[in-house]
Amino acid sequence: MTSILHAHPIDPAIRERVMATLEHIEQRHDVRVLLACESGSRGWGFASPDSDYDVRFLYVHKLDWYLRVSPQRDVIELPIDDELDVSGWELRKALQLLRGSNPTLFEWLDSPVLYRQDDATSDWLRHFRSEYFSQMKGRWHYVAMAGRNFRESLQGETVRLKKYLYVLRPVLAAQWIDSGRGIPPMRFADLADAMVTDAALRDEINELLAIKMQVGEAKEGPRFPLIHAYLETTLQALEKAPFFDRPDGQTERLDRFLYEVVTGASLTY
């Protein structure tokens, strides 16, 4: 069976600019970047020629930042320009989100496009990802995202083509979770290759991807009938499932991990 198309190249000049931006962030904010990756369409593998670069990163401050009475700002965001959208989360914030099984953070840790990473820290974060994963939180994140995009953007006879992918990807991720496969992969191609078994639907998805990766982000066109029918039927089934949640995972191991990263101790958890 033909595989779903995928691509996530990074222009060398852009990569160099991203690396320089990360170094500037470290110097200006006196932090250490632990992981920097692509989120969004370039991480998912279906960027348009004019897609911007969604650079996301995790960082840690020096010890004295954590010993202040007043809470400090725990995100760094740069002004968005025509090419780069750069923002990051401080490590304690990231661990709080990890404890709560945050799908966005999980995707960053699985991004196929890495700019920088501290290997030991990143390996442990990926280990914790599987330990703190909640099927229910994950599936309802993706079902809600898919349903919102479908209802808001795909109701006309002419639609913005990229919105199909912004519904397809979370639908497939929710199905991946429901099938018992665990944490969904970030790459769209990996999701589709595993979850889309109908040959005609796969062909139509590949046709959509080929168009998306050749035209601008704002490109509109007529509905893709097989994709549209599949999304309509599948979303109805996904949204009928009962919602059960679970409390956040235990904190003690993450507390120790935060201490060891901040102080530079050997990572043991």
Image (cartoon, rainbow, N blue to C red):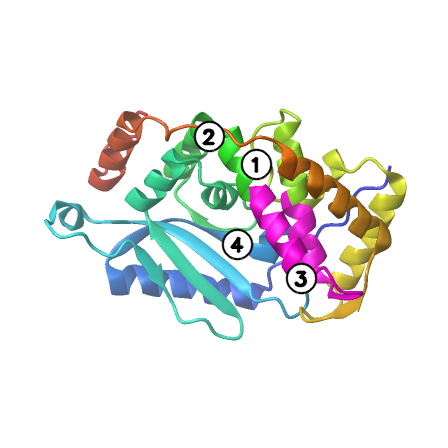
Secondary structure found at label 1: helix
Secondary structure found at label 2: loop
Give the Cα separation between the discs numbered 4 and 3: 24 Å
At label 3, the amino acid type is Ser
**In this orientation, does residue 105 appear?**
yes
Dot 3 alpha-carbon crowd within 10 angstroms: few under 14, some 14 to 19, many 20 or more:
some
Residue 97 vertical placement versus 124 (above, below) = below
For residue 245, the mark is: 2
Mark 1 and mark 3 residues within 8 Å of each other at the beta carbon: no
Magenta part of the protein: which range?
Answer: 142-170
At label 4, the amino acid type is Glu
For residue 153, the mark is: 3
Residue at 49%, 35% in the rendered image: 137
Image quadrant assignment for residue 224: bottom right
Dot 4 alpha-carbon crowd within 10 angstroms: few under 14, some 14 to 19, many 20 or more:
many
Place of residue 90 in the rendered image (x, y in percent of width and height, measured from the top left): 31, 50
Dot 2 alpha-carbon crowd within 10 angstroms: few under 14, some 14 to 19, many 20 or more:
few
Residue 248 vertical placement versus 44 (above, below) = above
At label 2, the amino acid type is Asp
Side of 166 relative to 233 (left or right): left
Q: Which residue is mark 1?
A: 139
**In this orientation, does residue 112 appear?**
no
Place of residue 24 in the rendered image (x, y in percent of width and height, measured from the top left): 33, 65
Q: Is residue 184 magenta?
A: no
Secondary structure found at label 3: helix
Q: Which residue is mark 4?
A: 38
Of the numbered discs 2 and 4, the one sitting upstream in the chain is: 4
Give the Cα separation between the discs numbered 1 and 2: 10 Å
Viewer-closest of 176 and 210: 176
